[in-house]
């Protein structure tokens, strides 16, 4: 089992920044890939970014590329999402996810574990 605990959400004005953190504990062999997804009420959960443990390779959704940066500290089993130049459309609940493989990281299906979510609200 893996437990994921997110933190760092909040309210920020458009153009501002936030940094989300996700600390993993438990069976860390299942955290080869760690990703961030987001969801608004009535909408599908969408991929934001992901990072692999092995080579540190990353993937981003087109809507956040150039503004968001995902990173991880393997020693601390923690993944971060630095969000800059935030827009009102970035408002959502952000979920951290962990999975055992680095393939297909844009799909929710490869992740076995999910955090409880943290709210990010960007005001215009």
Image (cartoon, rainbow, N blue to C red):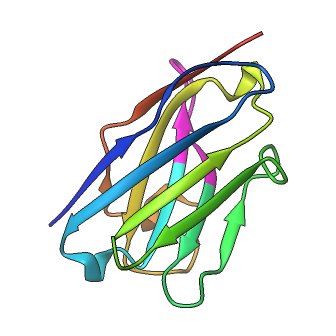
* Residue found at the far top of this picture: 124
Location of residue 119 in the rendering, given as x and y in whole percent from the top left corner: 46, 25
Residue extent of the magenta highlight: 37-48
Q: Quadrant of the C terminus?
A: top right
Asked whether the viewer can see residue 69, the reply is yes
Q: Residue at x 63, y 23 (%)?
A: 91
Res. 90 image quadrant:
top right
Res. 123 image quadrant:
top right
Q: Quadrant of the N terminus?
A: bottom left
Location of residue 3 in the rendering, given as x and y in whole percent from the top left corner: 21, 57
**As displayed, is residue 97 above or below residue 72?**
above
Q: Does the magenta portion include 8? A: no
Asked whether the viewer can see residue 105, the reply is no
Location of residue 113 in the rendering, given as x and y in whole percent from the top left corner: 30, 58
Q: Residue at x 57, y 71 (%)?
A: 51
Location of residue 47 in the rendering, given as x and y in whole percent from the top left corner: 61, 50
Res. 17 image quadrant:
top right
**As displayed, is residue 82 above or below residue 13?**
below
């Amino acid at each position: 089992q893996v437990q994921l605990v997110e933190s760092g959400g909040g309210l920020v004005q458009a153009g501002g920044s936030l940094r989300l953190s996700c600390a993993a504990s438990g069976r860390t062999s299942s955290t080869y890939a760690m990703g961030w997804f987001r969801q608004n009420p009535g909408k599908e959960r969408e991929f934001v970014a992901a990072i692999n443990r092995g080579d540190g390779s990353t993937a981003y959704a087109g809507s956040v590329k150039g503004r968001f940066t995902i990173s991880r500290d393997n020693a601390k089993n923690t993944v971060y999402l630095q969000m800059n130049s935030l827009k009102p459309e970035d408002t959502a609940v952000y979920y951290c996810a962990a999975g055992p493989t680095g393939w297909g990281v844009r799909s929710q299906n490869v992740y076995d574990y999910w955090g409880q979510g943290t709210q990010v609200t960007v005001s215009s």
